[in-house]
Image (spheres, rainbow, N blue to C red):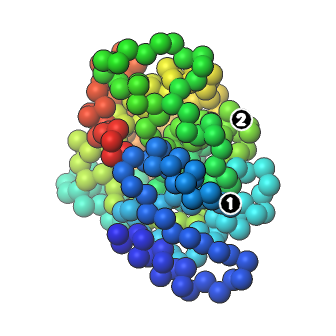
Amino acid sequence: SDTSRYLNDALRELSDPELHFRCIESPPGKIRAHAAIARSQQLNGYLLFVDADVVFDSDLFVRLFRYLQRDPIAQACYAEVEALPSVAGGVFGRLQNAYYRQRHRLRQRAHLHGRCFMLRSWIEELESLRSPLADSIELDDPMGLHHGPIVDDIHYSRVLVHRFGRHAIALVPDARVRFVPPHSIAELYRDSCRTELELARLDVLFPEHAYLEKQLLSGESGKRRCWDALWRAGLPAAAYVAIERVMRRFARNKARRRMARLSEGGICPSVT
């Protein structure tokens, strides 16, 4: 893949004798694949996860590595994301570009960002399918609860903060990845549905983590985030935040009523 090639090219440019990286291309399955690699490869050291569709500078993962070295409290860190110019046309594309130009001015979530993050180590809790505290699960549940956690960054964030505290996760502002943002409102809704579905699923699978979203991880309410965007980033960026919040609220209502299916969020357990 392009990402594998970029990684290997970057590794060849490194000359620091302290750093020894190994690139492993994950098979389909994401969390399950991560767990299989962690077990089979007997990895000792930090684990870097990078999406296959991002662009990054050659020193990206060195910056993440150095951050974890400096901060012994952090159990994971993640890169700042920058959007490439929107491929969406019309008003939506203009609002999207305005939002991502000003995104650095806004308060960010406390979750890991799944496009690029590094773990200090792999812990067994990350691969658990469900908590002993979870209620029994029906196999025909439309949310596919029997598959266990599916979206890696959300699940890993909750596990780490629950075990190590709110400062277990850190953003590294000078480590950046670039990605292509949603190309339409329909794709924005799919991404919103993906997030809300997984949050609802994880509240059932790991009820002891449910408090985290409201108290530690989710940040501001939708209304407050819109006002904050208007104040800090201007009307076009605030309009895009408002669209995003409406998508999230609609998706959240469906997910919490168990009326949404995994396919609405573009989630397929066998390849996610």
Horizontal side of 174 relative to 141 (left or right) equals right
Horizontal side of 224 relative to 251 (left or right) equals right
Q: Residue at x 47, y 44 (%)?
A: 31
Q: Residue at x 80, y 55 (%)?
A: 72
Of label 2 and label 1, which has the lower sequence position?
Answer: 1
Q: Give SS at disc 2.
A: helix
Q: Residue at x 63, y 40 (%)?
A: 124
The residue that disc 1 covers is 44
Q: Mark 1 belongs to which amino acid? A: Asn
Which one is nearer the viewer's eye here, 63 or 215? 63
Disc number for residue 163: 2
Farthest residue, direction left:
90
- The reply to whether residue 249 is in sight is no
Position of the N terminus, as image quadrant, is bottom left
Whole-angstrom CA distance, mark 2 to mark 1, is 21 Å
Q: Residues within 10 Å of mark 2 (few under 14, many from 20)?
A: few
Q: Mark 2 belongs to which amino acid? A: Arg
Relative height, residue 111 to residue 80 (above, below): above
Horizontal side of 136 relative to 251 (left or right) equals right
**Quadrant position of residue 43:** bottom right
- The reply to whether residue 52 is in sight is yes
Farthest residue, direction front:
40
Relative height, residue 210 to residue 83 (above, below): above
Q: Residues within 10 Å of mark 1 (few under 14, many from 20)?
A: few
Q: Position of residue 146 (x, y in %)?
A: 41, 25
Which one is nearer the viewer's eye here, 114 or 94? 114
Q: Give SS at disc 1.
A: loop
